[in-house]
Image (cartoon, rainbow, N blue to C red):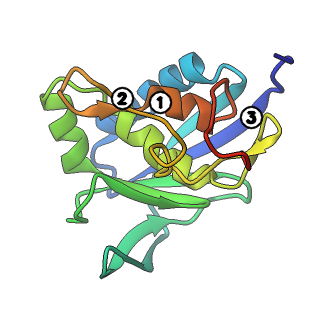
Amino acid sequence: MTKALMTNVILELFIEGGRNRELANRAGDGLRILVARLAPHIVLDVSVLNATDIRRHRFPWGGVERDVPYHAATSPGRQTLLMTDEPIGAQGWGWPGCGFVSIPALNAKRAAGGDIADIVIHEWIHTLQGMIINGRPVPFADDAERLGYTSVTGADGEPTWHAWFRFALGGEGQSASPSL
């Protein structure tokens, strides 16, 4: 395999009202550690910031119109995740550039003995969709099974997708899709 090109990425992790800073720091640290292990060609900087520009995003999913919060980036080329207590019906949602994670989902994952970085990395990959890393675009984060990847059971009994995350982030792996 050829030497991987280094990619610098900045994620802005926003908290509402200054609350949950410890959880946000833990999520950011966990994400950095997981990315360093799965995709060492990515230099990830995570900044925990107070939310000042929360916006709304609407999209259809599963036959339901979703209306969810997100935070705009402070500078072009950065990705954002808003940590929210708002009931969202999922662990998080993300799309190119922005997304958010559920604080109750992070707390439940941690209480069950799981790694909260498994939630954060999935939503972060949504924000990276289409970005070129190691010569290929980051795929849609929910395409793991369609592209031939399977999960393994994590410490909390929930599936983890580390082989998929490695591939999605431009690392080694095999996709069943000839277009990737």
Residue at image coords 35%, 79%: 67
Q: Residues within 10 Å of mark 3 (few under 14, many from 20)?
A: few
Q: Quadrant of the C terminus?
A: top right
- Name the amino acid, label 3: Asn
Q: Residues within 10 Å of mark 2 (few under 14, many from 20)?
A: some
Q: Quadrant of residue 23?
A: top left
Q: Secondary structure at mark 3?
A: strand
Residue under numbered circle 3: 8
Q: Quadrant of residue 129?
A: bottom right
Residue at image coords 28%, 43%: 20
Residue under numbered circle 2: 26
Q: Which numbered mark, 1 or 2, is in the foreground of this view?
A: 1
How many numbered marks, from 0 up?
3
Residue 72 x, y percent position in the rendering: 56, 66
**Tag 1 near tag 3, CB within 8 Å:** no
Residue at image coords 25%, 65%: 88
Q: Quadrant of the N terminus?
A: top right
Give 103 or 178, whichever is nearer the viewer.
Answer: 178
Residue 155 x, y percent position in the rendering: 22, 20
Q: Earlier in the sequence, mark 3 or mark 2?
A: 3
Q: Secondary structure at mark 1?
A: helix
Q: Is residue 135 left or right of residue 161?
A: right
From mark 1 to mark 2, how far is it between C-alphas?
A: 8 Å
Residue at image coords 42%, 25%: 30
Residue under numbered circle 1: 31
